[in-house]
Amino acid sequence: MHQNIACCFISHATVNLSAEKFSLHFPAVLITSLCALVALAGCVTTAEQENRWAFSCPDAYEFTVTFSEESETVTLEDKTQKHKLDKERSASGALYTDGTIMFWNKGVLARVELSDGIVHQECQGDSI
């Protein structure tokens, strides 16, 4: 994407538009416009980059997890707290922790250990 933006800046620098010179610079305007479209097509909003899931546990605990674009971190949020957790090594599934909160998932199943020692298991997730 950085190459696309550079292309637009380079093309834009060569364009000196006035009403009478427009036809002489039409190719430069066209190149600038095309570069801008290519650059914008590569833009992704934060919502598109995130992968958000809602989990519901058998004990009625509910929470959401938002995975970062490359799944290196998650944000775990329930009704009272919000935590950013880093990915850790796991033998199976994916494990995230901040040292006090632990979130583990494999597919749509999840387990959460909170800082007060409460463990929520067999939580079912749905993409939202």
Image: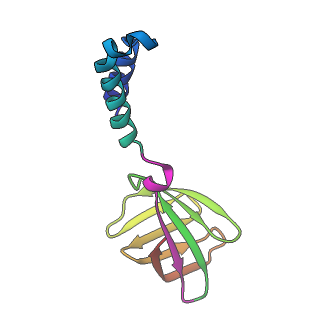
Q: Position of residue 103 (x, y in %)?
A: 50, 68
Instruction: Residue 20: name its quadrant.
Output: top left
Q: Nearer the viewer, residue 97 or 39?
A: 39
The N terminus is located in which quarter?
top left
Please check the rendered image and state whether residue 41 is part of the magenta-colored stretch, yes or no.
no
The span shown in magenta is 44-58
- Furthest residue to the right? 80
Residue under the point 41% across and 52% down: 69
Residue under the point 38% across and 31% down: 36
Q: Nearer the viewer, residue 18 or 12?
A: 18
Q: Position of residue 122 (x, y in %)?
A: 47, 84
Residue 42 in view: no
Residue under the point 63% across and 67% down: 115
Q: Position of residue 113 (x, y in %)?
A: 56, 72
- Furthest residue to the front? 20
With respect to residue 51, does 42 lie above or below? above
Please check the rendered image and state whether residue 45 is part of the magenta-colored stretch, yes or no.
yes
Instruction: Residue 80: name its quadrant.
Output: bottom right
Residue 5 in view: yes
Residue under the point 48% across and 76% down: 111
